[in-house]
Image: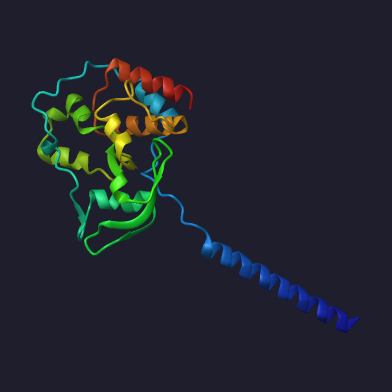
Amino acid sequence: MALSSVVYARRIGVLASAAALAALTSLVSAPAAQAAPPTPISASAARSYLATVTPKAEGSTSGYSRDLFPHWSTVSGTCNTRETVLKRDGVNVVQDSACAAVSGSWYSEYDGATWTAASDIDIDHMVPLAEAWRSGANSWTTSKRQQFANDLTRPQLIAVTDNVNQAKGDLDPGKWLPSRTAYRCTYARMWVQVKQHWALSMDSGEKTALVNVLNGC
């Protein structure tokens, strides 16, 4: 009986060690997770903010230029804002000595496409620069516009399919929403947070579209 107990205990120990090793191997070999921009405010917080917004007619683009929003500023070493977002939003991203992404993969939340070349990826300004200009940024200093155009703290920058970003252009949610409907709630929350933080105005069509999306979240 004593010998049988010892053999049994040894078998249990071997099995436990094997299970622990399998779990560790699984952990080590698990694929890297897709990263993302900072988590936006909740849908309820976004709805609460929208309830306080008085729509305002959008201004004009008179005097607007992208050069008035200095973007892709240096973040660290040779890495600028674009390369920082590519690294953050991608999977297994490898950068060269100049911080350029030479390999990796990127999932575009707007359309559900996956890309393996950084050249297929644009970094979208959630609230486009021209839209910001028409919503109050025309009165900002160049320094403040630079902070806005390189904002990594709020969900203002996201890596997406280049032609999708180009199709969005400077349109607000009243005129453009991601084709991937599963992302629209997140998109609306991101948009509202950016506009709220930077105290940018909203027109009536923009606000109505955001309310409609967020009411379904």
Q: Nearer the viewer, residue 45 or 157?
A: 157
| Residue extending farthest bottom | 3
On screen, residue 73 above or below 176:
below
| Residue at left offset 35%, top offset 25% | 49
Q: Position of residue 41 (x, y in %)?
A: 39, 35
Residue at left offset 39%, top offset 52%: 105
- Relative image position of residue 117 (x, y in whole percent): 33, 51
Can you say which quadrant of the picture contains the N terminus? bottom right
Does residue 174 appear left or right of residue 113 in this picture?
A: left
Residue at 73% x, 75% y is 13
The colour mode here is rainbow
Q: Residue furthest left?
A: 63
Q: Nearer the viewer, residue 40 or 59?
A: 59
| Residue plotted at (82% across, 81% down) | 6
Q: Is residue 159 above or below residue 213?
A: below
Residue 164: quarter of image: top left
Residue 78 sits in quarter? bottom left
Q: Position of residue 140 (x, y in %)?
A: 13, 32
Q: Is residue 96 left or right of residue 3?
A: left
Please tell me whether residue 30 is drawn above or below residue 121 in the rendered image: below
Count every numbered label the image shows and give the total. Answer: 0
Q: Is residue 32 left or right of residue 204?
A: right
Q: Is residue 215 left or right of residue 65?
A: right
Q: Quadrant of residue 148?
A: top left
Name, please, the residue furthest toward the right: 1
Q: Picture coordinates of residue 64 (x, y %)? A: 11, 29
